[in-house]
Image: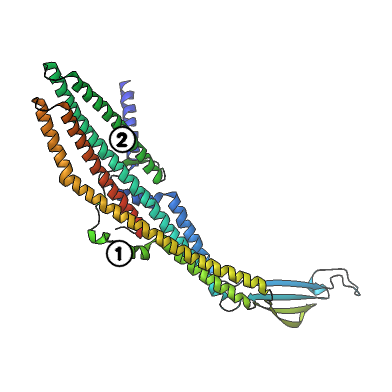
Amino acid sequence: MASHLALLAALAAAASLHAQAAEQLIGGRVESLLEFAREHHPEFAALRAEAESAAARIEPAGALPDPILRTELRDVTNEGLDASANVLPPRIGGARYTFSQALPWAGKRDLRRDVAGAGATEANARTRAGWIDLATRIKLTYAQHHVHLLSIRYTKENLDLMRRVADIARTRYASGFGGQQDALRAQSEIIAMETDLAMLEGESTQASARMRALLGRPENVKLRPPELLRTLPPVAKLALPALEDRLRANNPQLAAADARIAGAEKTRELVELNRYPDVTLGVSPTQTRNRVSQWELMFEINIPLQRDSRRAQEREAELNLEAARLRRQSELNLALAELGQSVAGLEVAQRLESLVVGGLLPQAEVNLNAALAAYETGRADFAAVLDAHRQLRRARTELVKARGDQQVRLAEIEKMVGEEL
């Protein structure tokens, strides 16, 4: 019996080790999450497939139409002949075979290929835009999760401090040097902070769930909690004029708009070529019994007489081009405005962090230590300790918020400029 139990335990341990080996561990840093999403996210894979599909349309768009073969059987009833009806060419009056090929007017095939190429370029730009949007959401969620975890750590430290204050208040009350109200207020403060801690832990769990969703809900993947925030780029890279130049050069939305403009321009040129006819050439051998008795050549053109229809098509193409140009300018204006806001927000967050780290946080810590020492010796009341503790909590909250805002602004800037900084 003991040997069976040992065998089962060994099998269970082996199965557990196999499951752990099969489980992939990612996270800790945002770069590993981005790498995993690029390789596994289904929506991004769909965008890549659409871009490849658009590229596959280029060659067919400029190809010649398939040639046409037409067969005409003559006198299949064999009227006047001592023979029954038939459909075999040697046994009827004759057969005519026509091979024809349509030839678009010079330049049309190249323009159709250019229009398809512009569509492929736009699809590639949409793929880039889709990836940058996904990467931005991953960066934001990672930063939010990191902020939650840092806030949880500070809240636990603040709770330990407040529990120490509560112990001092109870000791003073038991010794007859303080009032019961101090101990009650300390306990109320602890309950409020425990409530905040529960909310932060819930938000942290939600952030982890959002991150898993952004990664495509992968199986056999375990997420490590965020460990480090990304390092901010040098100040020179965050200068607004330089960022605006990079936005104009690399923004995927603008690249897609440029491709739409190029496609609209080629479409307009293609519509204008509809003023000229397309040509169809053909050759027709005629078979009589078992020999080819004659050859015929065919030349056919379409006559572009529907001027009103053609002018309406040209007007449509011109308006589509104008709309594409206006929409591109609108997207540029919006992107530049959002970039300016994000840069300004980043500068504010950096200044706030500097103020908190350089002055507010150290001063709050000194004030709390002094208030605690004075309260223990009866030289300060409980209100001074409580106020100093709240100042420290507020300073830590401002620090966490400032660092989180910097990450958010950095992700927004990178989304606008279309590349990592």
Mark number for residue 114?
A: none
Q: Position of residue 130 (x, y in %)?
A: 42, 55
Number of residues whose C-alpha sits closer than 10 Å to that of mark 2, classed few (under 14), some (14–19) or many (20 or more): many
Left/right of residue 202 with respect to residue 349 in the rendered view: right
Hey, what amino acid is under mark 2? Leu
Q: Callout 1: helix, strand or loop? A: helix
Q: Is residue 278 left or right of residue 53?
A: right
Q: In the image, what residue occupies the spot 83% across and 68% down?
A: 86
Q: Quadrant of residue 98?
A: bottom right
Type of amino acid under label 1: Pro
Residue 41: x %, y % from top left: 41, 49
Compare marks 1 and 2 and give the one earlier in the sequence: 2
Residue at 42%, 63% in the rendered image: 254
Disc 1 versus disc 2: distance between alpha carbons? 39 Å
User: For the residue labelled by badge 2, is the local secondary structure a helix, a strand or a loop?
Assistant: helix
**Residue that numbered label 2 is attached to:** 200
At horizontal 50% and vertical 60% (from top left) the residue drawn is 53
Query: Could you tell me if the residues under marks 1 and 2 are in contact, i.e. CB atoms within 8 Å?
Result: no
**Label annotation for residue 241:** 1
Of residues 98 and 117, the one nearer the viewer is 117
